[in-house]
Image: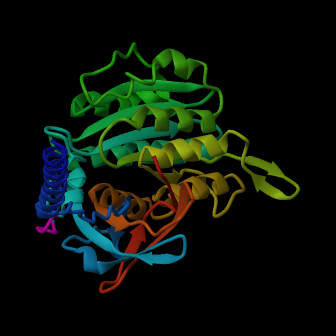
Amino acid sequence: MREAARKAVRRSRIAVVAAVAASIAGVGAQQPPRFGERVEVARLIVDARVLDDRGNPIAGLTADDFKVSIDGKVARVETATWVGGHDTVVDPEMSRSASSGTADRAAGIGRLIVFLFQKDLEPSRIVGLMRILLQSRHLLETLTSDDRIAILSFDSHLKIWTDFTNDRERLDRVLAHGVLFEQPPAVAASSMPSLVARLAPESGRRTYRIERALELIGEALEPLPGSKSLVLIGHGFGRFTRDGVTMENDYDPARHALVTSRTSVFSLDVTNADYHSLEAGLQLVSHQTGGFYARTHIFPDAAMRRLAGALAGYYVLFVEKPESQRSVHSVKTELTRRKGSVLTTSDISER
């Protein structure tokens, strides 16, 4: 009996060892887990308007024609996509990320342009304002059926004359007579795109500083697709002191709202002077948002021709972002193989 018991224990041990061995063999037969390496490259969108020395837009550029520096470091430009009156794409090899560039132009929505007239009846300003109002009417002839224009004015407060519309007759009436001689009518929000949907006339009536008006306009434009244009026709802003012109505290929020909404400001100075102190505000906001500043008391046709060229379209550049902990990045954009001036914002905020 004892011998039988010993044999039974031995058989049991052999069975356990065999089971463990089989288990180990089974594990070894399984395929080891595979790990794929995936690198996410952060990108920034840079809007660039490119003009020749006559103020005409330069079309047909590709990514290789641009050099972009972010925070002082050269960054690779992945794609360059032209967005203009006819949606011409100049870089046919759109990368995966560049699909957002085409989203800049939703179906049936072309260029979005806001005209803001800074109204002042002072003799050195009113003549120039009347001149540019007339010139602006000619600019309407360059619109396509997909483009939309909104008209606002500022004197003692912000006034809204039209929401975004492509009704040329209505726009022409406002420019020809309304801004100078009338009070704005009741303005209802149009179908998308709409400025008034986020900037009600009641808010305008409570806006007594042009810096605050610029901030509200930027905030209202932020959700709308693509790059927007704000044509600021006026005499300037800022505060003149013994140390020069300084910006009021509400300027920085205005600049931030405009940059975040991808809104470029094109400032046309109507003052009848070769120089005046308040032009500093117009120059600063245009430089920081990717627009330009121009005096109009001499050669107003040249200023309007350059404006028409800048409004014709822009390039959407998808740029690799260098490693950085900053939330606001300085930007410098140049041409590499062509001659021309490049208009871009001086900094970009990550959203």
Image coordinates of residue 67 in percent, x first then y, are: 38, 78
Image coordinates of residue 163 in percent, x first then y, are: 34, 26
Question: Based on the displayed image, in which of its 4 quarters is residue 335 positioned?
Answer: bottom left
Report the residue at 52% width, 41% height from top.
257
Labels in figure, total: 0
| Outermost front residue | 1
Highlighted range, magenta = 90-94
Residue 240 in view: yes
Q: Is residue 224 left or right of residue 282?
A: left
Q: Nearer the viewer, residue 269 or 288?
A: 288
Q: Is residue 52 above or below residue 179?
A: below
Q: Nearer the viewer, residue 6 or 93?
A: 6
Report the residue at 47% width, 46% height from top.
260
Query: Would you say residue 92 sits in the magenta stretch?
Result: yes
Q: Is residue 109 above or below residue 43?
A: above
Q: Nearer the viewer, residue 110 or 104?
A: 104
Image coordinates of residue 197 in percent, x first then y, are: 37, 21
Report the residue at 40% width, 25% height from top.
161
Image coordinates of residue 148 in percent, x first then y, are: 26, 37
Tell me the chief SS of the magenta region. loop
Q: Is residue 280 left or right of residue 263?
A: right
Q: Is residue 62 above or below residue 270?
A: below
Quarter in which the N terminus is drawn? top left
Q: Is residue 69 above or below residue 158?
A: below
Q: Is residue 164 left or right of residue 246?
A: left
Report the residue at 16% width, 45% height from top.
144
